[in-house]
């Protein structure tokens, strides 16, 4: 009979639109395996985001703030009070005082690799210190891609044997939307009137929105009429991007949606003619897979983890070159056969990514840390 352990999952950032989705999907997949007991540490007001009905799990509402002295004192007390056998932190924060073995997920080292995304030198020093402390404290490290593993090793000076690559996946809510009423409602909500290229993501320098605007100028020169929809939370960088759009003469063709509600994302993807990902640094690149899941052809940067994730299901171009990226956009825009091929390849590529598989691999990491024999680690 498999050994049952009590595992704590630190979900205090579950409201974050990026890492929060990872937390929710992974925890739900782990609960479906029904092998261990879980304590889900969640911020107040988020308890309904994960259902534990019929599962061996309990929720603990916690007001502990990330990166605070209080969490360093209180989190170990919580772990001891609940007799936790292992803590999994899906963010790079671990208590420095060990109360039990621990696993940490480090998705990337963006702020070490892309200093312009965190201009404050003091901020980068703190980020490096916290991440280095988590790397030292953790018994195992999980990361999202082989690229991120190599980046962690390079920036944090750690050997490969402590790091496990476990691919995440996309949520079941991402699928092609065909309901015309839903599609039209989304278009009306975000003032989209024509066929468009979509890019979704926060407005950070590494995301290369400026490069995409320049490439879009070249697409317009080639196709005559198109829209560019830039989806993501408003940021001070938007003013600069709007100024660039005006300089390029494309203001009337560019839509900044601001924050897009999750319920609108599948329709926003599904209605696009193309999905563009000109990013210069990604630890994984969720939006590329989300676009593929919604049946949209992808034109993609050839940098960092993106070729690893998109495989042979994207049209690649040098996103540092507006001419090359714009030419690739034009090729995918015009060539129906190419678009159809990319859509079919995208569906096939998605088969490499599964939350159930990610959960099974994560359980294997837990068992290695806990010393559970392989013959006793079979899900009940």
Image: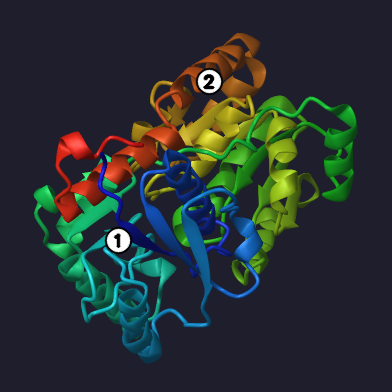
Please give the label number shown on residue 347. Answer: 2
Work out whether 374 lies above or below 126.
above
**CA–CA distance between discs 2 and 1?**
31 Å
Please give the label number shown on residue 218. Answer: none
Q: Which quadrant would residue 316 be assigned to in this image? A: top left
Residue 50 in percent (x, y) is at: 59, 55
Q: Nearer the viewer, residue 264 or 367?
A: 367
Residue 62 in percent (x, y) is at: 51, 78
Please give the label number shown on residue 113. Answer: 1
Work out whether 185 lies above or below 44.
above
How many residues crowd around disc 1 within 10 Å: few (fewer than 14), some, or many (20 or more)?
some
Q: Secondary structure at mark 2?
A: helix
Residue at the image position 39 percent from the left and 90 percent from the top: 70
Q: Earlier in the sequence, mark 2 or mark 1?
A: 1
Quick check: can you spot residue 207?
yes
Residue 53 in percent (x, y) is at: 60, 51
**Which quarter of the figure is the C terminus placed in?**
top left
Q: Name the front one of labels 2 and 1.
A: 2
Quick check: can you spot residue 278?
no
Q: Is residue 298 left or right of residue 368?
A: right
In the displayed orientation, state which residue is furthest to the top: 337
**Which quarter of the figure is the N terminus placed in?**
top left
Q: Is residue 375 left or right of residue 316?
A: left
Q: Nearer the viewer, residue 197 or 366?
A: 366
How many residues crowd around disc 2 within 10 Å: few (fewer than 14), some, or many (20 or more)?
some
Residue at the image position 43 percent from the left and 35 percent from the top: 356
Work out whether 377 lies above or below 152.
above
Q: Secondary structure at mark 1?
A: helix
Q: Nearer the viewer, residue 27 or 371?
A: 371
Residue at the image position 62 percent from the left and 58 percent from the top: 49
In the displayed orientation, state which residue is furthest to the front: 1
Residue at the image position 75 percent from the left and 50 percent from the top: 255
């Amino acid at each position: 009979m498999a050994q049952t352990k009590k595992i704590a999952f630190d979900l205090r950032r579950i409201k974050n639109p990026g890492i929060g989705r990872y937390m929710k999907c992974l925890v739900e997949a782990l609960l479906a395996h029904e092998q261990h007991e879980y304590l889900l540490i969640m911020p107040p007001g988020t308890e309904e985001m994960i259902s534990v009905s019929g599962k061996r799990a309990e929720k603990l509402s916690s007001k502990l703030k990330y990166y605070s002295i209080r969490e360093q004192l209180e989190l170990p007390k919580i772990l001891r009070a609940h007799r936790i056998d292992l803590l999994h932190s899906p963010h790079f924060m671990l208590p420095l005082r060990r109360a039990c073995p621990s696993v940490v997920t480090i998705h990337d080292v963006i702020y070490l690799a892309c200093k312009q995304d965190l201009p404050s030198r003091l901020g980068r020093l703190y980020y490096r210190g916290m991440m280095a402390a988590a790397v030292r404290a953790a018994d195992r490290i999980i990361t999202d891609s082989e690229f991120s593993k190599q980046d962690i090793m390079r920036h944090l000076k750690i050997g490969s044997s402590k790091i496990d690559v476990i691919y995440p996946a996309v949520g079941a809510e991402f699928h092609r939307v065909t309901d015309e009423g839903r599609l039209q409602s989304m278009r009306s909500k975000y003032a989209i009137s024509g066929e468009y290229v979509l890019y979704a993501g926060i407005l950070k320098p590494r995301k290369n929105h400026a490069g995409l605007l320049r490439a879009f100028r070249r697409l317009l020169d080639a196709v005559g009429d198109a829209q560019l929809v830039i989806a993501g939370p408003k940021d001070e960088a938007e003013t600069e991007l709007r100024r660039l759009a005006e300089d390029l003469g494309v203001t009337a063709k560019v839509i900044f949606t601001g924050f897009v509600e999750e319920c609108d994302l599948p329709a926003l993807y599904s209605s696009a003619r193309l999905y563009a990902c000109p990013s210069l640094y990604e630890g994984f690149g969720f939006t590329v897979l989300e676009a593929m899941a919604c049946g949209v052809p992808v034109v993609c940067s050839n940098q960092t983890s993106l070729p690893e994730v998109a495989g042979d299901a994207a049209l690649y171009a040098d996103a540092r070159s507006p001419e090359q990226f714009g030419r690739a956009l034009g090729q995918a825009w015009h060539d129906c056969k190419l678009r159809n091929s990319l859509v079919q390849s995208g569906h096939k590529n998605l088969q490499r990514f599964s939350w159930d598989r990610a959960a099974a691999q994560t359980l294997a990491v837990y068992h290695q840390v806990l010393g559970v024999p392989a013959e006793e680690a079979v899900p009940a």
